[in-house]
Image (spheres, grey):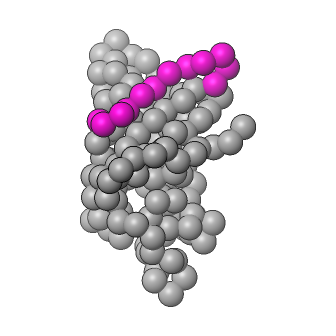
Amino acid sequence: MKRFDWIEHPSDVGFRAYGRTLSEAFENAAIALFEIMVDTSTVRPEIEKSIVLRSEDPESLLYDWLDRLIALHDSEQLVFSKFEVNIAQISEGFLLNAKAWGEKFDPSRHEGRTAVKAMTYHMMEIKKKNDEWLVQAVVDI
């Protein structure tokens, strides 16, 4: 199963990420997000960040997840290459417990690609088809 692919958008960047579970699809969405910014194969998993989020629905959770990763990139200059996500349905909606591994962006080793400004709800989609989850997102560049 492929992890993600790109979708056409006239002014921003969009992607579809796939997984056998919703958690795996969120992991692959995070990889796609950082592939926009950097070649993730060059990113060493040296720094671990824990992230806990609660949202009322899966779409809000996806938005909050990717938005938090963008914030970590912007505030701490971190790029990530490995993710472990666990999503559970709770009485108030959905709970995400995740870990992200990466390092500070180093221009001598990381080729900078496109800067991501913000997460959007534009064209966002989450669905399960047969035994595969698909999450689709567009980010503002």
Q: Quick one: 44 or 132, which is closer to the camera?
A: 132
- Decide if residue 116 is on the left or right side of residue 17: left
- Residue at (60, 71) in percent of width and height: 42
Of the pair 76 and 10, the residue shown nearer to us: 10
- Seen in the image, is 139 located left or right of residue 129? left
From what the image shows, is residue 1 above or below residue 49? above
Q: Quadrant of the N terminus?
A: top right
The magenta segment: 121-132
Q: Is residue 110 left or right of residue 53?
A: right
Q: Residue furthest top?
A: 91
**Would you place residue 17 above or below residue 140 in this image?**
above
The image shows residue 29 at horizontal and vertical percentages of 50, 43
**For the view shown, which residue lies furthest in the bottom direction?**
108
Question: To which quarter of the image does residue 65 belong?
Answer: top left
Vertical placement of residue 24 versus 106, above or below = above
Q: Which residue shows up at 40% across the image and 52% down it? A: 13
The residue lying at 59 percent from left, 35 percent from top is: 18
Residue extending farthest right: 1
In the rendering, at what x and y percent does residue 33 appear?
45, 53
Which image quarter is the C terminus in? bottom left
Q: Position of residue 132 (x, y in %)?
A: 63, 25
Residues 94 and 15: in front is 15
Labels in figure, total: 0
Percent across and percent down for residue 120 are 28, 42
Residue 36 visible somewhere in the drawing: yes
